[in-house]
Amino acid sequence: MIDFNNSDEELNSLRKLSLLQKDSPQIRKSIANILLNKGNFEEAEKEYKIALALAPDDFEIKLKLAETFYHENKNSEALVIIEDLLKNKSVNENVHILYSKLLMRMGDIEEALKEYKKTFSTYDDEYESILLSEPVDFYEKNDKNSKNKKQDFGNDIKFEKAIINFDDVGGMENLKEEIKMKIIYPVQHEELYKAYGKSIGGGILIYGPSGCGKTHIAKATAGEVKANFISVDINDVLDMWVGQSEKNLHEIFEQARKSQPCVIFFDEIDSLGTTNSMKYSKEKPIINQFLSELDDLKDSNDAILVIATTNAPWHLDPAFRRLGRFDRIIFVPPPDIEARVSIFTVLLKDKPISKIDYQAIANKTKHFSGADIKAVVDLAIEEKLKDAIKKGSPELITTKSLLNAIKKVTPSTKEWFFTAKNYALYSNQGGFYDNILDYLNNFK
């Protein structure tokens, strides 16, 4: 295959070529490779996914997609691919390097070292010395702009004022009312709740399929209570230096206490508190610190809300869900019909469209996540772009073109619900997954 350099001109040439050869995974892979090298990870992910759909068994595409996930801090997604690649006879050193890097990010230095050693035919004392003495970024170890992991984490904490609220969340009225009762009203009516002995802070766990707006809901919730907002990437907290991770985490909670009311948001909390991670002794101190901070909130009247999201609640250690920790659980299902109409309306705004029957396309996208709906719109646009290039003039997006695109997209939530249903039926202690069963029964 032609070796394309990383330039805008060649990227544009490849895009034009992809319009003519839409079913070529190699062209899609070349586009994605350029985007990855340019640091455009979100667009690279889209292109790799399209390429992988066309060539499901392509080893290199899978590896590159895993690498892209890594750069996007989507550790769970990257690990799923890497674990699959490790079963392949074609596994190469790059797979072991990326797996080692993911283990390093999780704080499991010993396993990271073992995995990295698989890339050498002999034992590498020098590398082990580096790995045990300072953080190693295998892909960016020569990047002069990389952050010094030993700096004081507290100086990097940024407070935000959430700029969205529930008015910016289309539909999902039942979900919003549930959040109001569990989170917003306790803050807005603090004295009333205290009179009844109800705490106004604590932990809330939001779970559901990927791409259904859990992060959006969390930020909108902060906007509703008009609170300061701290968004925490758990990978920025973790540090290989003894005691530093715990210090970083404590500093976040201390800053939140000084800026009440405050919402601390942890995305993908399962990357820290999984049943698998609990078995690693080196991770226990940071986990214990996290649980201790939650327990402190339980025993105080601090107006601090800790909101965490996860796509896989069944992987979260039960210790996180004990009373006073993440004991308020909220299920975020795929967007309802009103929300789907809203999403389509926003995505098609300012696009060349004919009169769109939003109700009709919303009816045909049951169980679609917000990300799936975006994929539908992108496909419809691509088809119209092809026609526009041939005719030399813009082609309007119609209801029919959107309905045709819907036929080509499989709801990504199906796989999630397949797994979730098994847990809901056979591992539903305390009714934790009742909301999943209710959703499945009501929206068959």
Image (tube, rainbow, N blue to C red):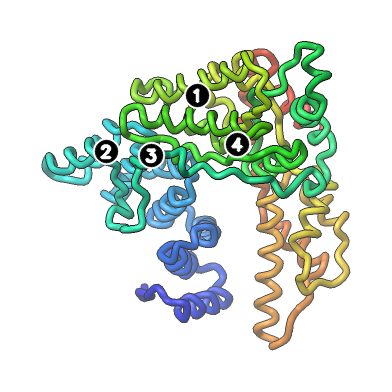
**Against 406, is 169 above or below?**
above
310 or 147, nearer to the observer: 147
Q: Which mark is residue 115?
A: 2
Furthest toward the bottom, the residue is 392
Give the SS element for disc 3.
helix
Find residue 105 and name its label.
3
Residue 161 percent location from the top left of the image: 67, 45
Of residues 194 and 368, the one nearer the viewer is 194
Residue under numbered circle 1:
290
Return the mark for residue 265: 4
In the rendered image, residue 90, in percent from the top left (x then y), is placed at: 30, 49
The reply to whether the C-beta atoms of the residues labelled 1 and 3 are less than 8 Å apart is no
Q: What residue is drawn where x is 80% and y is 18%?
A: 193
Question: Looking at the image, is mark 2 or mark 4 earlier in the sequence?
Answer: 2
Which of the two labelled residues, at mark 2 and mark 3, occupies the earlier sequence position? 3
Cα separation, mark 2 vs mark 4, equals 32 Å
